[in-house]
Image: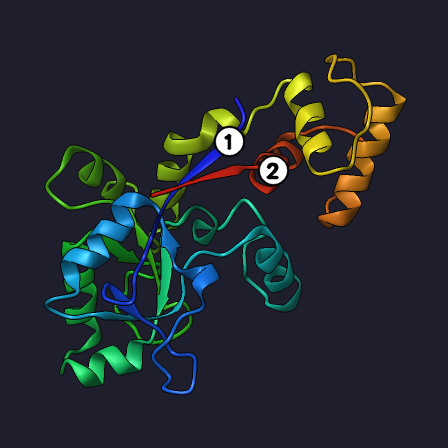
Amino acid sequence: MLMTLELSVVPPSSASGIYGGSKDQLPERMRFLHPEAALSLAVMAPTRKVRCSDMLRTAESSLQAHAEKRGVQPPGYSAHNFGLAIDIDVDYMLTQHDLNKTDLDRWMDENGWVCHRTDHANGSESWHYNFIGLPDTPDGDMYRGLIGKSSAPAVERKIQNLYGACFSMNDVEVQASLQKLHFYSGECDGKIGPLSRQAIRAFQRAWRLDDTGMLDIKVERTLAFVSADRHIT
């Protein structure tokens, strides 16, 4: 199954940013989230509009960030890639709305967003929130059951439930995806021969994967994400 990312536009009325001359803008390329997450921000905005520094992250921006920053997930592994994470301006939110970090985390959680770190400390990754769904709902409670020191396992399960079937590709899908990305010019016949191996190796080099010419879970997940279509509402 080839991947199609389900995304909704996040308008300025739902969330502000930290960029631009007035320091309240967010680049248009970032203003997309999974439909459930986008709806949540829209519902939250009349009470407190969340100020974001990062939202949707493309494959290219993830590759660059992974190369430059320790701890940033590679393409296809970040919740930002699937519109299920935001980075917020924590200091602004605390000051503007007279909150402490525990209050902020509680309010975000009530609306489906759980901080990456669950100790309510204002430090590394305290700005990163994963959307796992509203509490007191079957899905939201199931994902919350996976939260420990971090909400990362919960959002990874959500990603798997949404897109996991696309991460395991058959050979025809591999060839079609490589062809779409202009790495492969042969027929999509399901036969992984020398031309296909060459294309796989070219893809691996371009996306900083081990240059083996072999398919594995990491290669297929990365390929599925990089070649994914977008359905935007």
Q: Is residue 139 above or below residue 86?
A: above
> Element under label 1?
loop
What residue do we see at 44% from left, 56% from top? 56
- Counting from the top left corner in percent of width and height, residue 82 is at 43, 46
Q: Is residue 40 left or right of residue 233?
A: left
Instruction: Identify the residue position indicated by label 1 in the image.
Output: 3
- Mark 1: few/some/many CA within 10 Å (<14, 14-19, 20+): some
Q: Is residue 212 visible?
A: no
Looking at this view, is 64 or 23 the one in front?
Answer: 23
Quarter occupied by residue 105: bottom left
Report the Cα–Cα distance between label 1 and label 2.
Answer: 8 Å
Q: Is residue 218 above or below residue 155?
A: above
Work out which residue is located at the far right of the displayed protein and give it: 194
Check disc 2 and give the amino acid type: Ser
Quarter occupied by residue 173: top right
Looking at this view, is 198 or 100 the one in front?
Answer: 198
- Counting from the top left corner in percent of width and height, residue 149 is at 33, 56
Instruction: Identify the residue position indicated by label 2 in the image.
Output: 227
Check disc 1 and give the amino acid type: Met
Q: Is residue 61 above or below residue 98?
A: above
What residue do we see at 36% from left, 51% from top? 33
Which tag, 1 or 2, sits closer to the chain's start? 1
Q: Are marks 1 and 2 in contact (CB under 8 Å)?
A: yes
- Counting from the top left corner in percent of width and height, residue 182 is at 75, 37
What residue do we see at 79% from left, 30% from top? 184
